[in-house]
Every structure is written in C-alpha cells, then in structure tokens.
C-alpha cells in the first residue's frame, strides 16, 4: 500500500493529488468542486488501495474531514500556510518558461484553476520533505475544474 491522497481543501473547489510514495510520483492530479470531493475519493479508493489521506488544515478542512468519515485508514492534517502563494513558484518549476516567452510577464502563463492541485502537491511534498515527480501521462494544464 504505497498510494496516498493529498488534498488542498477549499470552499468552492479543492485540489487533490494521488501519489505513489514508493515511486515518488504523482499518479493523478485534479481540481474539482468541493461538493464532489467525497464521491471522487470514494471512487478512487475503490480503484486504488489508498493507505492514507493528507489534508491541509486551512479552509473547510474540518468539513472535508467529516465527509471522509467513510475512510477508515489514517487521515492526517498538516500545515498549509502559504501553499497557494508557493504554488505559483512551483508552477514554473513544473512548466519552465523558455524562448521569447521570457519577455512576457510570468503571471500570464499561470492557470489559476490549477493552483489548488499544485497546492495539494506542495502539502504532500512538505509532509514527506521531498519533491515528487509527475507521471508522464499527467497534463497539468488541463486539470478539471
């Protein structure tokens, strides 16, 4: 059981990543409406054997925890201070700017809808104190809302 979920909870939308801790890889990443989070995690848990869930302790984390009562394994709350701010810098680590794009302000390239999933990634990386690699099949620029 090496797979786990990291969640950046929010009022209207939440970021979620599914990671393989042994391979240090992100298998799946998504931003979804917070009201759909419970069903999404339930479905994911039937397909994958999830060993634990890591949740950022910020906005709506207690409400999200209540929705995840069905998950009988370990649920951990971790500090998520400044993860949204830090996700902008991490975005450019994941998607470096090259060529003439350097002349354009960096903020134009950030898709804010993706920042919640990147925040979930940062929560995971902070907890394990290491960076995770992205699975090659993940296209972070088209995460769902």
Image (tube, grey):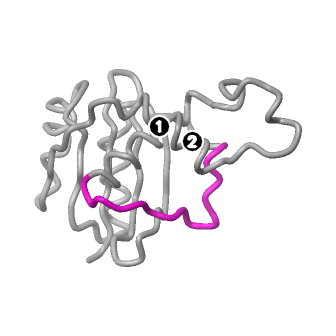
Q: Quickly name the residue at label 2.
A: 91
Magenta stretch: give its range.
127-141
- Residue 97: image quadrant is top right
Badge 1 density bin: few <14, some 14–19, many ≥20, Cα 10 Å: many
Left or right of 110? Residue 32 is: left
Of 100 and 42, nearer the camera is 100
Q: Residue at x 24, y 54 (%)?
A: 127
Of 91 and 145, nearer the camera is 91
User: Does 145 sit above or below residue 51?
Assistant: above
> Which mark is on residue 100?
none
Coordinates of residue 86 in the picture (x, y in percent): 43, 35
Mark 1 falls on what kind of element?
Answer: helix
- Asked if the residue at tag 2 contacts the one at tag 1, i.e. Cβ–Cβ closer than 8 Å, the answer is yes
Coordinates of residue 116 in the picture (x, y in percent): 45, 35
- Residue 91: image quadrant is top right
Q: Residue at x 61, y 58 (%)?
A: 138
Residue extending farthest right:
100
User: Does 48 sit above or below residue 38?
Assistant: below
Coordinates of residue 95 in the picture (x, y in percent): 66, 47
Left or right of 75? Residue 49 is: right
Coordinates of residue 5 in the picture (x, y in percent): 32, 56
Q: Quickly name the residue at label 1.
A: 87
User: Does 13 sit above or below residue 100?
Assistant: above
């Amino acid at each position: 059981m090496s797979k786990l979920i990291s969640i950046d909870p929010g009022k209207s939308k939440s970021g979620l990543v599914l990671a393989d801790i042994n391979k240090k890889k992100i298998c799946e990443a998504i931003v979804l409406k917070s009201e759909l989070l419970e069903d999404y995690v339930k479905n994911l848990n039937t397909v994958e054997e999830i060993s634990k869930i890591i949740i950022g302790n910020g906005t709506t984390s207690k409400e999200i925890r209540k929705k995840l009562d069905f998950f009988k394994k370990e649920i951990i709350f971790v500090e998520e201070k400044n993860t949204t701010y830090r996700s902008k810098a991490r975005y450019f680590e994941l998607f470096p700017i090259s060529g003439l794009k350097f002349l354009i302000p960096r903020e134009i390239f950030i898709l804010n809808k993706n920042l919640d999933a990147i925040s979930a990634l940062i929560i995971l990386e902070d907890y394990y104190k290491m960076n995770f690699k992205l699975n090659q099949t993940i296209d972070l620029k088209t995460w769902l809302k």
